[in-house]
Amino acid sequence: MSAATLGRQRAATSAHEGAERPSLDDLGILFLSGAIDEGAARSVCERIVELNVQGEAECIQLVINSSGGDWHAGFGIVDLMSWSRLPVYTTGVGLVASMALVVFMAGAAGHRVLTPHTSLLSHTFRALVAGTRAELLARRKLEDWMHQQLVAHYQRHTALKTEAEVAARLLGEGDLWLTPGEAVALGVADRIHPLCPSLPLTQEVA
């Protein structure tokens, strides 16, 4: 067999194997990383719609590692997760902060998973605005509504069912950092994914 023929066969085999190997997107595995802005929200929302239309995946797995971002972009993702016929499971890795936490907790009940070393940050939204008195008053109306929606979201997706509880435990005036265990205890997450059995949590010192 000539080298050219062997090369063509290898190329054909490689192409065949590549055609059979589905992408993560095809499997319904999506990633939300970095800042949550209009571009990130559009990408995630488009894939949620496409996966629902295609009807090939049984669920959508959204892996989140983000410091947060825009309120409207984040809740755009949340609304599409709620609309989705396919259940959206969420997995938090690395950092799940601010608006990213809002998206994470909106995952399907029982399927909101954290890795052991994930850090979580909860706080109320922040805004820096300038304008005329009329503009500031109009903005205040929007900000009050946004806060009410945020509190209601926490009430729906955590173990805290009153506005007072949410304000005291998760949406106070400052930043609140949570460990994965604390997030599970508060109903923000459902479980912590165990480490690989071959990787011990600690090593004995000789």
Image (cartoon, rainbow, N blue to C red):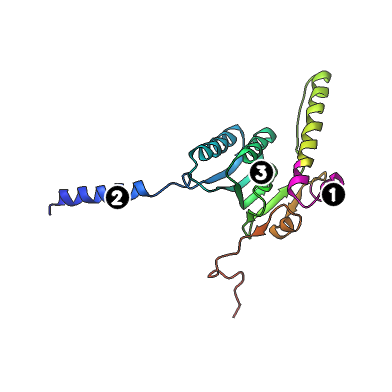
Residue 192 position by quadrant:
bottom right
Q: Amino acid at mark 2?
A: Ser
Distance Cα–Cα, label 2 vs label 3: 39 Å
Rendered location of residue 106, percent (x, y): 67, 45
Residue that appears at 48% across and 48% down: 27
Q: Give the x, y percent position of residue 152.
A: 78, 41
Front residue of this view, candidates 186 and 173: 186
Quadrant of residue 70 in the image? Answer: top right
Q: Which label is found at residue 103?
A: 3
Mark 3 or mark 1: name the one nearer the start of the chain. Answer: 3
Query: How far apart in space, not on screen, are marks 2 and 1 (Cα)?
Result: 57 Å
Looking at the rendered structure, which numbered label has been put on residue 145? none
Q: Mark 2, residues whose alpha carbon is within 10 Å: few (<14), some, or many (≥20)? A: few
How many C-alpha atoms fall within 10 Å of the one at disc 1: few (<14), some, or many (≥20)? some
For the magenta stretch, what is the residue range? 153-170
How many residues crowd around disc 3 within 10 Å: few (fewer than 14), some, or many (20 or more)?
A: many
Q: Residue at x 79, y 25 (%)?
A: 139
Total numbered badges shown on the rendered structure: 3
